[in-house]
Image (cartoon, grey):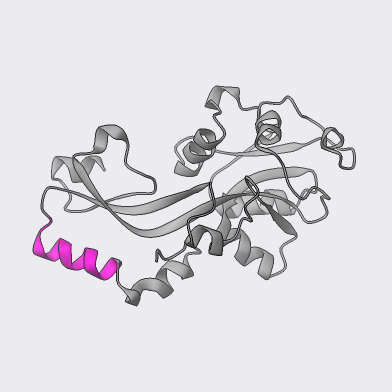
């Protein structure tokens, strides 16, 4: 974003919506990504209210028995600072980074998936597309709905899932002819397989 704004780059990328102080930039959405809460498949919990998620991540709810499940300490898996999924998660649940009581800090989706898949007491949040892929290939995970909406790529695609983000190309001013060609290509039907191959959702 900074390089696009300064003119150092013709195009930049932002895996989030533009901030209010970035309205001098133009954003073109090339894909969508939903962020889903995951638990182990053996965990009997099927849904959590927003306030329960907040309680877990603040360290106020520390045992699954408090949520009507089998007793066991909740292992909270959280994203490292600097990840846009972290920003989106905190914003959606009105959490401050300083409030989170995490047991494990992870980086990418695969680390989060591995952490929860290997621990029936764990809870985390990752890209829905990545989690769906792993579940389809036998990973012992479950995606939990948020706000009563199923955590699926289909719900991300129709924009009914509440915890989602656009993946944008950004530019300042008028793009060069070559940059415009790339934007046109990146928003064409010819890249749908590339987008889905990265477990994201092609916008309709």
200 is higher (above) or lower (below) than 103: below
Magenta residues span: 175-186
- Per the picture, the main secondary structure of the magenta-coloured stretch is helix
Q: At 73% across and 54% down in the image, what residue appears?
A: 117
Q: Point out residue 169 in the picture as x, y percentages from the top left corner.
A: 28, 54
Q: Position of residue 196 (x, y in %)?
A: 47, 69
Residue 29 in sight here: yes
Where residue 141 appears, as percent x and y from the top left, is: 72, 57
Q: Nearer the viewer, residue 121 or 175?
A: 175
Task: Locate the C terminus by quadrant.
Answer: bottom left
74 part of magenta stretch: no
Q: Is residue 102 left or right of residue 45?
A: left
| In the rendered image, the vertical position of residue 9 relative to residue 179, given as above or below | above
Give the total number of marks visible in the rendering: 0
- Of residues 153 and 86, which is closer to you in this image? 153
- In the rendered view, would you say 120 is above or below 137? above
Q: Residue at x 25, y 70 (%)?
A: 185
Q: Which residue is drawn at the image coordinates 39% and 60% (left, top)?
A: 31
**The N terminus lies in quadrant:** top left
Q: Is residue 102 visible?
A: no
Tell me residue 49's x, y (percent): 69, 39
Q: Is residue 185 magenta?
A: yes
When asked about the image quadrant of residue 127, the answer is bottom right
Residue furthest out toward the right: 70
């Amino acid at each position: 974003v900074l390089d696009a704004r300064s003119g150092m780059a013709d195009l930049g990328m932002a895996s989030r919506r533009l901030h209010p102080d970035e309205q001098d930039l133009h954003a073109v959405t090339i894909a969508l990504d939903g962020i889903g809460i995951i638990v182990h498949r053996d965990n009997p919990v099927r849904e959590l209210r927003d306030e329960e998620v907040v309680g877990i991540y603040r360290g106020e709810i520390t045992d699954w028995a408090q949520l009507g499940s089998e007793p066991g300490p909740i292992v909270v898996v959280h994203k490292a600072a600097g990840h846009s999924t972290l920003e989106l998660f905190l914003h959606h649940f009105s959490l401050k980074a300083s409030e989170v009581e995490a047991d494990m800090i992870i980086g990418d989706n695969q680390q989060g998936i591995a952490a929860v898949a290997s621990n029936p007491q764990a809870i985390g949040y990752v890209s829905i597309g990545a989690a769906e892929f792993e579940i389809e290939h036998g990973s012992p995970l479950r995606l939990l709905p948020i706000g009563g909406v199923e955590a699926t790529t289909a719900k991300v695609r129709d924009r009914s899932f509440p915890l989602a983000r656009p993946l944008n190309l950004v530019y300042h001013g008028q793009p060069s002819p070559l940059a415009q060609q790339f934007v046109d290509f990146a928003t064409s039907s010819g890249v749908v397989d590339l987008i889905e191959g990265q477990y994201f959702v092609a916008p309709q």
